[in-house]
Image (tube, rainbow, N blue to C red):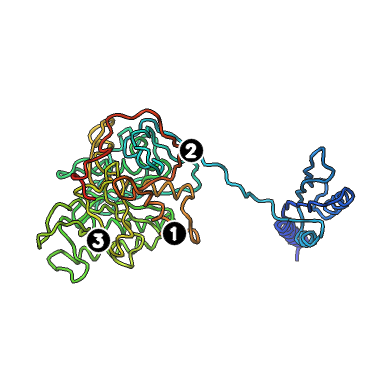
Amino acid sequence: MHPTKVHHTVLASLLLLIAATAAANVEYIIFPIDVLEDSQGSELDVLIKSLAVKPEEVYVSQRPHLPVPTYWAATLPEDEFKLLKEHPWIEDIFPNEPLVEQFADYQVQHLAPEELRVISQPPGRVPISRYHNYVYRTDSKKQIFIYHAELGINADHRDFADRPIEWLYTNRTKFTGNALKTESPSTEHPGHSTCTASKAAGKMFGASRLATLVVVKMPDLTPASTAEVFSTITDHILEKQRQGQSIVTASWGSKVPVKIADPDPSGHWSYWRSVRRDLQELTHTESVVLLAAGNAAQEMDRLGHPRLNVDTAPAIFAAEFDMLRLLVVSNVDNAGWLWRTSQTFTNGFSARFSVFAPGVQVKCAAHNSNSDVGIKTGTSFSAPLAAGVIADAMATNQIKETEGTPDIVEILIYAQGWRRPGGKRVVWNWVDREHNPPSDALVQGLFNETLDAAAAVA
């Protein structure tokens, strides 16, 4: 072999050896026993420095009036660590790694919309009228994405200014020439899509202040568009490697009930089966999907019974045992009364996956102005609000994970908040009273702070 190549080979081996040695050397913190005598302390000091990788870099913490050090911090090879671990004069020795979490940082939005105040209202009997602000955590520890599956947004509205936003267009959106950073026109519900996105991640009206909003735009809500939206999101999450970092929210559903068991062919089951399959595939990316429960509780079914239970798709799919990462969100007023039109899962297995969030006369960004405010009511606006709360909880590591994946049980415990005067457990962002104390003054003119029970479904 050429001498130069031999030299390079030896040098490379030497560098690898040095790197391996450095990796094996760890800084340890060493605490002596309480009854250590002065002379023993001096002997231990000499021993630790003799075993350290660099004796001159051994840190000794010692108070002036005490003869024995409180502790030593020394970088040691593994064998020397094992030797000191067995020493009778050493009470404890362990790697000098962070054990204390930095205190959470909080931000306050003064005189925020009422529904946001409800979200950060600490448990207790103090009425919402004495909580003037929306308080939320800002100590983000990882990036979270909220995929908003609808018709786009009015990106010029000030509620979205300076917010991190990505645009994702379905193939049909591109095919129809609607791949524009706007809201697709809607004759039935103009501005609905901008408003729901605003409740998820707007800087004035949204629950999340940390997540990136991914606007997943469809050209319309026809089957040809909605049949591919969830697969579009799945492909994007996999492509960007955002498994376990994504929340999906959808505030639309079928106009008529959809049966799971013994489906009626006239209900276009082939279409809904395709949507269900895509939703199931989406949950396999460890994403959490929040769906609006529906607003047909005052309508009658074919037998003349009120449609209190969730019965429209895609929300109805959360009733199935293999769709555990689907949550259905119903709307309540600001006192926690279930709104009279809101559907929900009233009993059984699926009731465990019901979430309740404010959704009565909520404020949001308007679609036809860069500053106007819309006021809306419905489960459509509760779902993105809950999505925003969960997203920021994931971003601040308030939700425990299993192998890097947010645990669905922990998400439910978090999302189901605390029981309000109206009887429902309403979503809460877990800001305590220390960081959000009530004011002595009342806020006047709150929407639906205390509704008459006759106007709501208990």
Q: Looking at the picture, how far across and down is residue 62, in whole percent?
A: 79, 42
Instruction: Please indicate whether residue 64 sits to the left or right of residue 102 in the image.
Output: right
Q: Which of the 4 quarters of the picture holds residue 377? A: top left
- Label annotation for residue 327: none
Q: Local crowd at mark 1 within 10 Å, few (<14), some, or many (≥20)?
A: some
What distance separates the C-alpha of mark 2 from that of mark 3? 40 Å
* Residue pointed to by mark 3: 316
Q: Looking at the picture, how far across and down is residue 43, in whole percent?
A: 88, 52
- Label annotation for residue 407: 1
Q: Which of the 4 quarters of the picture holds residue 134? A: top left
Mark 2 or mark 1: whose residue is earlier in sequence:
1
Residue at the far bottom: name it: 262
Q: Which of the 4 quarters of the picture holds residue 235? A: bottom left
Marks 2 and 3: which is nearer the front? 2
- Label annotation for residue 434: 2
Task: Looking at the picture, tell me which residue is in the foreground, 230 or 457.
Answer: 457
Question: Tag 3: residue type?
Answer: Ile
Which quadrant, please, contains the N terminus? bottom right
Secondary structure at numbered mark 2:
loop
Q: Looking at the picture, how far across and down is residue 329, in whole percent?
A: 29, 52
Task: Looking at the picture, tell me which residue is in the foreground, 254 or 7.
Answer: 254
Mark 2 or mark 3: whose residue is earlier in sequence:
3
Q: Looking at the picture, how far across and down is residue 203, in whole percent?
A: 37, 36
Task: Looking at the picture, tell me which residue is in the foreground, 127 or 56.
Answer: 127
Q: Are marks 2 and 3 in contact (CB under 8 Å)?
A: no
Residue drawn at x 28%, y 64% as measured from the top left: 348
Instruction: Please indicate whether residue 97 sits to the left or right of residue 273 in the image.
Output: right
Residue drawn at x 31%, y 50% as measured from the top left: 424
What distance separates the C-alpha of mark 3 from that of mark 1? 22 Å
Question: Tag 1: residue type?
Answer: Asp
* Number of numbered tags placed on the structure image: 3
